[in-house]
Image: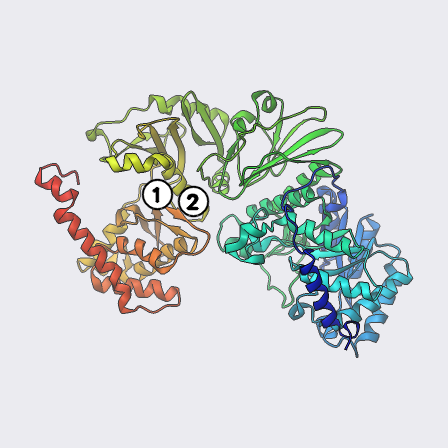
Amino acid sequence: MSATDSPRLSFGLAVGSALLRGRLSLPGGHHAPAGHSVSEALFGVGVAAAADPAVDAYITERLRETGVRHVRLDFAPGDEAGAQARLLAHLLAAGLHVTLHLVQPREQARRMPGAAEADWRRFVAATLDRYGKSVEIIELGSTTNRQRWAGHTVAGFLAMWEIGWQEARQRGLTIAGPSVTDFEPVWNVGLLHLLALRGQLPDLHSDNLFAERSTEPERFDHKVLGRRLIALGKYNLIKKARLLARIGADYGVPRLFSPAAFWTLPRIERRLPNGEEKQADYLMRYLLLCAASGSLERAWWGPLICHREGLIDNGVRPYPQLERITHYASVEGECADLRARPALAALRQVIAMLSGARYEGRLNTAAGLEMHAFRTPDRLVHAVWTINGRAAALAELYSADDFAAARLFDRDGTELADVARRIVGEAPHYLVWEATRSVTVLPTATLLCDVAIAWHRATERKLQHYYFRDGDWRGIVLARSTAELDHFITQLHPARLVTPSKAGALRHARNAIWSVPDPCASDRRLVIKQPVRLHPHKRLLDRWKPSKGLRSWNGTCELMRHNIAAAPPVAWFERIGDDSLLDNYYICEHVAAPYTARDMMSAFAEGEHHFAGVEELTAYRQLASFLIRMHGGGIQFRDLSGGNILIDPAVDGELGFSLIDTGRIRIQEERLNLRQRFDDLVRVCNKLHWDGRKEFLKIYLTAMHRRLRWWHRVPFYLYDFKVAAKRRVGRKALRRLLGRDRS
C-alpha cells in the first residue's frame, strides 16, 4: 500500500520527516521579532444567536463600543431558517467582517466518508450560494484533532474537507482550516501534508491556539516536553505561534489564524479568586503576546456570550454536552440576562492601543516582567505587566524624565495619576508618550526582588499599590489615593517609628508587635511587626533571605492571592543595606478575633463537645476544609500553631478562620504532598487529644479520598516528642532554669 492510498501512513511519514528535518523545533523562537504591524483583524470574537431577537442588536452594539470589526459565526445544518441565520443577516447589515464557520454535526461527521456526504454537500452549496459573497472567510473543520468532540476520523475529515473546499473554490471564496485545537503541531503537519497531496490547501492555516493549559500566557508550556524539560523546549505562546506559522509556510500557507481561544472561569477559580478579573488579565496578556509574535494574522477570543468563558455573562446555565470550541451553537437566555465582564473593557482598550501599531520589540530581558513597545503615527505605547503575584515599580524601570512625560492607563483604560509612585502587576498597564519621543528602559529593569502582591484582592477593596522610596528606605503601601498615601507616610514613616518597650507591646521576644491607630481610618487599628533580636545563626542564614518584614508581607499576600483569609496587609518597609537585619517593618490591619484554634483544640481536649456554639465534629470539618483549601493551593504554612489561626464566631453555623504570623510560608505550583501537609497538621493538633486527632485526620483525609492508616500517626508522635524535648532540654527549659522565661 502506498502512502497516497493510506491517509494515516501518509500522515505519519510527513510527521516523521518533519521531525528528522528539525521542522518542529525553532531555537530562539520564544523571543518576539520586531518590525511588524498589528492589523485590526488581529482582534475578533465568536458570536451566536439567542432565541430573543433583541440579543442581535445587543451584540452589534457591544462590538461597536469595543471596536471589534471581525466575528466568527458557527453555522450548521438546521440553522438556515433559525436564529443563527437571523443573526448572520444582522451582522452583515451592520458592516461586520464575518468568518462563517461551517460545522458538520457530530452524528453526521461519524458517518464520513460515506452516507453523510450528500447531505453535507447540499448544505455547503446552499449556504455558500446564499452567503458566500457577503462573508469574508469560510472556515471548514472544527477541532479536527478531537474526534470525541468533532466526530471525524482522519478519513472522515478529508471527505468533509474535499466537499467544502470544492464548493468554496468554485465560488472564489477564501478558505480557512484545518482548525487544529491547542498546540499539537504533528496534527498541523500531518493534515496540511494530506491536503497538499490532494491540491486542497486552505488560504489561511487555522489553529485554536490556546494558552489556558499553561495557566499564564507567558509561561513555557509544561505539556509539550514535560516539566523536567520545560526550559529546554521554551515553548511559550510566541514560539508556538512562530512555529505554527513556519509549518504553514512550509506547505505554502503562511497566513496563520487562531479562530478561538479562552480561559474558562472554573479553571481559573480552581486556584485563584477574582476569576473575572483574571480572565480580563489573561485576555489582554494573550493578545499583547500574539501581537508581539508577528506570526498571527488573527487571534480571536471564543464565545462573546457565555456564563463559563464569555466576555459577557448570561447567568448560570447548564453547559452543553458539546464543547463550545467545537460548536458555539446558541446563547441561552434573554437580553435582560446579559452582563458585560471586565474582559470586554480590557479588549476595548487593547484594540484602541494596538490597532495599526508597529511592534518595536520587547524592552527588557528579566523573567517575570514583560515590557513591549508599539508605535502608531499618534503615540508611543509601552505595555507593561508581570506574571501573577509579582510587582515592578515604574520608578525603577524608567528615568525620571520619561515617566514624568508619560500618561499611564490601566488595563481597562482609566488614566492614573502620580506615575512615579505606581506599581504594575499582573493586570497590564499602558504608558503613552508622544509619537516622536524616544524612551529608553533602564538596563536594570526587573521585578521588585522577592516581592509578592495580591493585586486583585487589593483592588476589590478599592486599594492601590504604591511604591515607597525615601532615602535608604523602600517598601509598598496600600492606599485609596495619593492623598491617603501621603497622610499615611506622614504618620507612620519607617524612619520615625519607635519600637515600644515590653510593657507597651502586644509581644516582645524575637519580634516586637504593637498596635497603633490607623491614620486613615479612625475606627480601625493597625498592627506593626519588627524583628528586634536574631540568634547568631539566623544573622548568618537570613542575610541571603528577604527581610522578615518582607517575608510577612509576601506570606500574607500569597494567602490572599489564593483566597485564604489573613489579616489584610497595609505596608512593608525596609532599610536598604541594613546589616543588622532589624530595620524592617510589616504593617497589617488588626483582626479582633475572639478565639484561636489553640483555644478550640484545648477546649475539646478538656472534654468539651462544643466550641463557640459549634459541635465538635462540625468544627473539625470546617477547620479541615479551610486547611485543605490552603494546601490545595500549594501553600505550606510551616508555622501552623493553633495561635496563628484566628477564629470568628459562627455565622449561620460556619466558623470564620483567618491566619496571622505568615512569614514562613512556602508556595509551590503543585498541591502539597502528604508529608508537607502533615508538617502543618502536627502543629495545629498539638493541643488536641488523640481521639480528637483521629477524628480530625479522618475528616481531612476523607476529603482527599484517602483512609487513615496507622503510619499517619507517626509524624504526630515525632512532633510530640520534639515539643516535649524542647520543654525539658531546649531553650525554654534553659530560660526557666535561669528564671528568664518569656512565655
Frontmost residue, 444 versus 732: 444
Q: Vertical placement of 547 versus 710: above or below?
A: above
Quarter placement of the C terminus: top left
- The correct choice, above or below, for 680 with respect to 450 in the image is below
Residue sitting at the far bottom: 115
Rendered position, 194 above or below 660: below
**Amino acid bearing label 2:** Glu
Q: CA distance from mark 1 to mark 2?
A: 9 Å
Mark 1 or mark 2: whose residue is earlier in sequence: 2
Its colouring scheme is rainbow
Tell me: 740 left or right of 309.
left
Out of 427 and 460, give the one closest to the viewer: 427
User: Which residue corresponds to mark 1?
Assistant: 662
Mark seen at residue 558: 2
Taking 486 as reference, is 406 left or right? right
Residue 332 percent coordinates (x, y): 66, 60
Q: Is residue 215 left or right of residue 636?
A: right
Structural crowding at the residue carrying mark 2, measured as other residues with C-alpha within 10 Å and reported as few (<14), some (14–19) or many (≥20): many
Q: Position of residue 231 (x, y in %)?
A: 54, 50
Q: Nearer the viewer, residue 352 or 63?
A: 352
Provide residue 68's location: percent of width, then percent of height.
74, 45
User: Residue 493 at what x, y percent from top left?
Assistant: 38, 23
Secondary element type, mark 1: loop
Camera sees residue 634:
yes
Q: Is residue 264 visible?
A: no
Q: In the rendered structure, which amino acid carries the disc numbered 1?
A: Thr
Q: Nearer the viewer, residue 109 or 231?
A: 231
User: Pointer 1 and pointer 2: residues touching (CB < 8 Å)?
Assistant: yes
Q: Can you tell which mark lies on residue 151?
A: none
Q: Label 2, secondary structure: give it.
A: helix
